Image: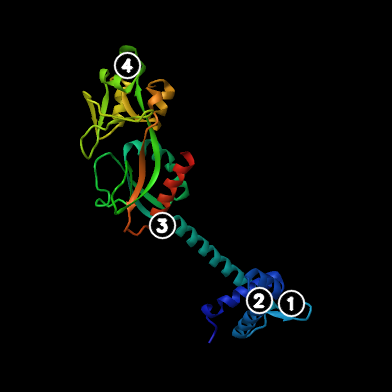
């Protein structure tokens, strides 16, 4: 009965390295085993094949004609096996499959989506399904793998990885400030048109936060935004009033002069965003890749 590949494969590898390096000692160093182990492997292979693969003398080791012919076939096979192993390892490392992610419009449109091209280039086998919405949804019940949420996460069944504490400011258009003047203190806001954002879960207006000294100010606003705070930015740009939001959301408007920050000395308060996912759910390589990407991107950009 001819030898099986399973029984000879380790011996074939020893033979190939010996052929390539010209000695048992150098082959052993490459394989990180002893020279005696390599010599025994080659001898076992020769017995299994019924052929001499090397001519051995005290000074040198030379391949026979059978050894040279056999090496050409074996080297090609070992190379194919190594390539298959690398491809399998790379695929496993990168992950594949579908990952469903729920994100609010604020973080999603201004921080996550602009960075996704880098992720797609690095992980082409991963499919992403993004829910970009501020609706109050149970992302676990609806089958999402991950979510990004604002505020402190108190659910014991979730793991929360903080992405950062993002600073807040109050903004208005130049046209509004020309018509109504600029507030000098947070208390002056009672005499101004303010735009409120109503929290999706409670329907209550999100209080405005100030620093130096710390102040949490509830405001009565005739103009209120439901679900999407980006609407408040659009209204502020249109001159409809003052709006408190994150600095990162209005970088473009500030640079273009479409909005001006007021009360900058009282800015500096923050609200957190976190990446969250269930504690109990087994996470695929694809999900772990998305987690690592989001956390890493936030650490790099701050």
Rate crowding at label 2 as few (under 14), some (14 to 19) or many (20 or more) other CA atoms within 10 Å. Answer: some
Q: CA distance from mark 2 to mark 1?
A: 17 Å
Q: Residues within 10 Å of mark 3 (few under 14, many from 20)?
A: some
Q: Nearer the viewer, mark 1 or mark 3?
A: 3
- Residue behind mark 3: 285
Q: Residue at x 33, y 56 (%)?
A: 279
Q: For the point 37% across and 55% down, which residue is it?
A: 97
Whether residue 72 sits left or right of residue 58 in the image: it is left
In the displayed structure, would residue 1 be above or below residue 176?
Answer: below
Q: Which mark is residue 34?
A: 2
CA separation, marks 4 and 3? Answer: 51 Å
Quadrant in the rendering for residue 189: top left
Left or right of 100 in this view: 42: right
Front one among 280 and 25:
280
Q: CA distance from mark 3 to mark 2?
A: 37 Å
| Helix, strand or loop under label 2 | loop
Q: Which residue is mark 4?
A: 176
Q: CA distance from mark 1 to mark 3?
A: 47 Å
Q: Earlier in the sequence, mark 2 or mark 4?
A: 2
Query: Residue 61: which numbered mark, if any?
Result: 1
Q: Position of residue 294 (x, y in %)?
A: 42, 46
- Please state if 185 lies on the left or on the right of 24 as rendered: left
Which residue, as the protein is rendered here, is positioned at the far right? 59
Q: Are marks 4 and 1 in contact (CB under 8 Å)?
A: no
- Residue under the image location 29 percent in, 24 percent down: 235
> Which of disc 1 and disc 2 is earlier in sequence?
2
Give how far apart the Cα atoms at labels 2 and 4 are: 82 Å
């Amino acid at each position: 009965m001819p030898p099986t590949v399973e029984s000879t494969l380790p011996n074939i590898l020893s033979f190939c390295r010996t052929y390539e390096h010209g000695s048992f000692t150098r082959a052993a160093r490459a394989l990180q085993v002893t020279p005696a182990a390599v010599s025994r492997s080659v001898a076992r292979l020769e017995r299994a094949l019924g052929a001499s693969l090397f001519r051995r003398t005290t000074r040198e080791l030379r391949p026979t004609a059978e050894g040279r012919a056999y090496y050409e076939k074996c080297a090609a096979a070992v190379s194919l096996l190594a390539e298959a192993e690398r491809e399998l390892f790379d695929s496993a490392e990168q992950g594949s499959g579908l990952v469903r992610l729920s994100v609010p419009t604020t973080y999603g449109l201004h921080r996550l989506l602009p960075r996704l091209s880098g992720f797609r280039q690095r992980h082409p086998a991963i499919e992403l399904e993004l829910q970009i919405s501020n609706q109050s949804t149970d992302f676990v019940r609806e089958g999402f793998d991950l979510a990004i949420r604002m505020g402190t996460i108190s659910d014991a069944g979730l793991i929360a990885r903080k992405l950062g504490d993002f600073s807040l400011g109050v903004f208005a258009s130049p046209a509004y400030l020309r018509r109504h003047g600029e507030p000098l203190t947070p208390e002056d806001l009672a005499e101004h048109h303010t735009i409120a954002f109503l929290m999706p879960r409670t329907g209550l207006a999100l209080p405005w936060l100030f620093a130096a000294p710390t102040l949490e100010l509830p405001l009565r606003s005739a103009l209120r935004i439901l679900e999407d705070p980006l609407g408040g930015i659009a209204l502020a740009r249109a001159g409809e009033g003052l709006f408190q939001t994150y600095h990162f959301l209005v970088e473009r408007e500030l640079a273009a002069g479409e909005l001006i920050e007021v009360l900058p000395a009282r800015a500096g308060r923050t609200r957190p965003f976190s990446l969250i996912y269930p504690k109990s759910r087994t996470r695929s390589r694809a999900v772990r890749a998305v987690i690592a990407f989001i956390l890493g991107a936030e650490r790099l950009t701050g």
